[in-house]
Image: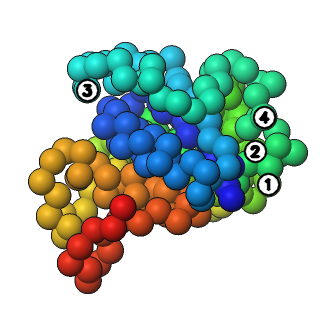
Amino acid sequence: MLKVAVAVTGASGAIYAKVLLNRLEASMGTAISHAGVIWSTNAHTVWEYELGDDSYKNVPLTTWQLNDFMAPVASGSAGYDALIICPCSMGTLGRIASGTSNCLITRAADVMLKERKRLVCVVRETPYNLIHLRNMTTVTEAGGIVCPASPSFYSKPNTFEALADTVALRALQLAGVPAKGYAWGQHTTED
């Protein structure tokens, strides 16, 4: 079973985080032995603005404070298998690319890269400028995975949550979590 951490930044796209955290919670005890979440300073504000609620308060996962460098995910010896940053702001991506571990999110990302574990950055920005692209290249060359929050439509999603789930599912699969959902060529969705 996997140990997975999620970081939620203040980038637009709180619905992606909500759906991802719901899927992660559903995987507890089967594919995942432990999961925790780190919230950036602005993550709650964006969540409340975009989703119109404070349901992040009810996420039943371990929560680490942004400045808690004693959290297990800050050390390779804790054995975390993956970190998914969803949504990942370009500021966060830039700090990861430059090796700046100024908070628990960027430190945990640094740990994933140095330990050759899975780091999935679900970036949420459009359009990209050259600095964004170079930071994505740097993180990719260091072993991270850049997964743009670009939903797929071939599953014919009929709600915003179903659309966001196409990205959350992909992020979990990239992190090594055996999450099931729509796959190309299938006619039904398995949950």
Against 107, residue 56 (above or below) is: above
Evaluate if marks 2 and 1 touch, with contact meaning CB atoms under 8 Å apart: yes
Q: Quadrant of the N terminus?
A: bottom right
Q: Which residue is mark 2?
A: 111
The picture places residue 172, in percent across and down from the top left corner, at 49, 57
The answer to whether residue 174 is visible is no
Q: Which residue is mark 3?
A: 51
Evaluate if marks 1 and 3 touch, with contact meaning CB atoms under 8 Å apart: no
Q: CA distance from mark 1 to mark 3?
A: 35 Å
Q: CA distance from mark 2 to mark 1?
A: 6 Å
Dot 3 or dot 4: first in sequence order is: 3
Residue ID at (26%, 83%): 185
Q: Nearer the viewer, residue 75 or 176?
A: 176
Q: CA distance from mark 3 to mark 2?
A: 31 Å
1 vs 4, front mark: 4
4 vs 2, front mark: 4
Q: Nearer the viewer, residue 124 or 99?
A: 124
Q: Badge 2, how many Cα within 10 Å: few under 14, some, many 20+? A: many
User: Label for residue 10?
Assistant: none
Q: Quadrant of the C terminus?
A: bottom left
The picture places residue 80, in percent across and down from the top left corner, at 73, 48
Numbered disc 1: secondary structure: loop
The picture places residue 93, in percent across and down from the top left corner, at 53, 41
1 vs 3, front mark: 3
Q: Which residue is mark 4?
A: 72
Numbered disc 2: secondary structure: helix
Q: Which residue is mark 1?
A: 115
